[in-house]
Every structure is written in structure tokens, then in C-alpha cells.
Image (cartoon, helix red, strand yellow):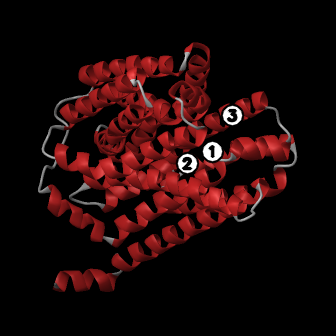
Amino acid sequence: MRMPLLALAMASFGIGTTEFVIMGLLPEVAADLGVSIPAAGLLVTGYAMGVVIGAPIVAIITNSLPRKATLIGLSSMFVLGNFLCAVSPDYWMLMGARIVTAFCHGAFFGIGAVVASNLVPPNQRASAIALMFAGLTLANVLGVPAGTALGQALGWRSTFWAVVFIGIAAVSAIALWVPRNIPHSSGNIVSEFAVLKRPQVLLAMGMSILASASLFTVFTYIAPLLRDVTGMSPHTVTWVLVLFGIGITIGNIVGGKLADWRLMPSLMGIFVGLAAVLVVLVFAVPFAVAAVATIFVWGILVFAVVPPIQMRVVDSAIGAPNLASTLNQGAFNLGNAGGAWIGGAAITLGVGYAELPWVGAALAVGALGLCVASQALERRENSPLAQAACEEC
């Protein structure tokens, strides 16, 4: 089953690259299209909100389709969106093209996670999800730096052309390697939204939002933090971000292994570590070596939560795993947008760059609280009294 998972990872690599590379090309995009850098920055927000809004819409449209055909269609939509980005003559067409691309994002990762978990034995499901998401983490290590360098050298449009070719390769790989007979329940999608009434599903999605917000509250402003507080040069900051990307790649794999071992205890331990490392970052950031080491560990922990949370959502959403898994991708991106806003609001209120990790740590503690509540609820539901009451019903 390695080849089908590799095909899914190739697609996630392309999607991750196109989502994040725009951040490094904002000056070039703004200059070429004649808009301000803050206006160009809205291309990031527009993409994130496109994921949030598009996830349930695409889930409804594709509910009755075979999983392989759906993945091929979503990957093709990704290719089309990046093609439109590359040829956009003005700002508004580029914004529309970004939103078209974002619509396939949440559904692809949501459905892809369920497909990946169905390709392997039960005790390897979280690791399979982690392998698919490895493409997303590698995008931050390789795709984004390479795409940024390419765009700065040959123009920002060249980066999107490169992503188009990555997307074509991913579509071909999915068509060749992903099996056709993937289990799929295609019930009434509207009735499946009732899964959102389940406390365990809502708690897991709440963890997604807070974990993502904890990351982006700090990470959105990591460059000025390292430049102004640590005293690093822009070139050094780039290499620190590459190291952070290596950390999240490691964390993604480790998180999958831990989730296959003991999901909820591992998730609680990761949240504790995440809050702790952000507190350490407050005191480490003035010192270059300590800051770099702490940021590397932060990268490992911050992405180690992704496979366990995704697996928790799939396990909790019995009868509607595809929908819940897709909506969880919207939750992650809602956390992305919310975290960036929280960080910006904190700075506006007078919080310094060096103090932002306190805010991120508080959000991580909030995610830990939801995790503890979810575990307590599960124990209550599995207690002999609860099971006896269920049998009587």
C-alpha cells in the first residue's frame, strides 16, 4: 500500500506548497499587480476561508461519488486553480483562482485521510494518515523555499506553473496507484451533518482549531520575532524556518506512531509539551542557539498533534467519517486565520513579539483542556452504568 499513500502524499505536497508559498512572494505579487502588500496578504486569508467554506460544499457534492474518482477530480481542480493563478492578469482574478484552489484543499485532505486509513491494517491507520500528511510537511521544508526562490528569480507566476506540473504528476499517480475498490458509505449527506451534534466530534474539532491557532499566533510573526528580538539576519531566518519544517516533518511521523500506540494519552502529553515549549521560547528567544533549538522542538510537537486529532475525528464520527474528516480540515484552517488575527490583535494591544509565545501557550492549554474533557467523556460513556442504561434503551 506504499504506492497509493505516496500518490496521496504527492498531492498533499503540491497543495501545501501552493498554500504557503504565497507568503514569501507577497512583495513580487503586490508590485506586479499594483496593490499594497497588506492587500496581497489577503490572498492568504482568502485561501484559508476558501478551505473553511469549501469543505462542506465539496463534501456534499462528492458524497455519492467513488473515492478514487473524487480524489482525481479534486486533484484536477487543484491543477486548474493553479493554472488560473499563473495566468491571472489582475488581483481579483488571482484571488478567485486562490479560492478555487482552496475549495479542493479541505475535501482532499479530509477524504484522503479516510482513504489512507482504509488502505492499511487497523493498527497502522494513524501512521498511514501521517504518511499522507508528510507531503504537506515536506512542502514547508522543500516546496515553499524552492518555490519562493524560483518566484523571486523568474517571477511569481513561474512558481504556480511549477505547482501545476506537480499537480499533473499527482493526478497521474492517483489514477495509476490508488485502488478502485475503496470502502465508501454514501448515505444522505444532509443527515450526516447530524454528526456535528456529537460532543466527541466537536471536542476533537475544537482541539484542531486551538492547536492551529496556537501555532499561527506565533508563527505568523516568526520572522520579525527572530529579526528584531533574536537579532538574526533575513538569510539566517530562512534557514531557521527550514529547520522548523524538518521538525514538523519528524513530528508528523512521530505523532502517527504515538496515535497508533495510545491515541488520547499521547495527545494529552503532546499538548502539555507544546504549552511547555512555548513558555521556554519566551525565555530562549533572546539567545540565538537556544531560540533555534526551541523552535526545532516546537516544530516537532506542533505537528505531532495532527495525525492523532484527525484519527480522533474519524473514529468519533461513526457513519460520517468523510464529512467529519473534511470539516476538520476547515477547523484547522479556521485556527490558522484565527491565530494570525489573535497574534496581530495582541501586538496592536501592546504585546511584544517576544511575549507572543505566552498567547500560543495559553491556546495550547485550552486544547489540552478539551482533550482531557474528551477523555473524561469517553470514560463516562464506557462505564458499566452507561452501558447498562444503553442496553435498557
Q: Amino acid at mark 1?
A: Ile
Q: Secondary structure at mark 3?
A: helix
In what quadrant of the picture does the C terminus appear?
A: bottom left
Q: Secondary structure at mark 2?
A: helix
Q: Amino acid at mark 3?
A: Leu
Foreground of the two, 57 or 99: 99
Q: Is residue 140 above or below residue 202?
A: above
Q: For the residues marked 3 and 1, what is the alpha-carbon distance in whole angstroms?
A: 10 Å
Q: Amino acid at mark 2?
A: Ala
Foreground of the two, 38 or 195: 38
Residue at the disc numbered 1: 300
Task: Tell me the residue at 21%/32% (across/down).
Answer: 68
Q: Is residue 120 visible?
A: no
Foreground of the two, 295 or 43: 43
First-in-chain label (3 vs 1): 3
Q: What label sits on residue 304 in the rendered view?
A: 2
Task: Tell me the residue at 64%/39% (across/down).
Answer: 247
Q: What label sits on residue 52 in the rendered view?
A: none
Q: What label sits on residue 243 in the rendered view?
A: 3
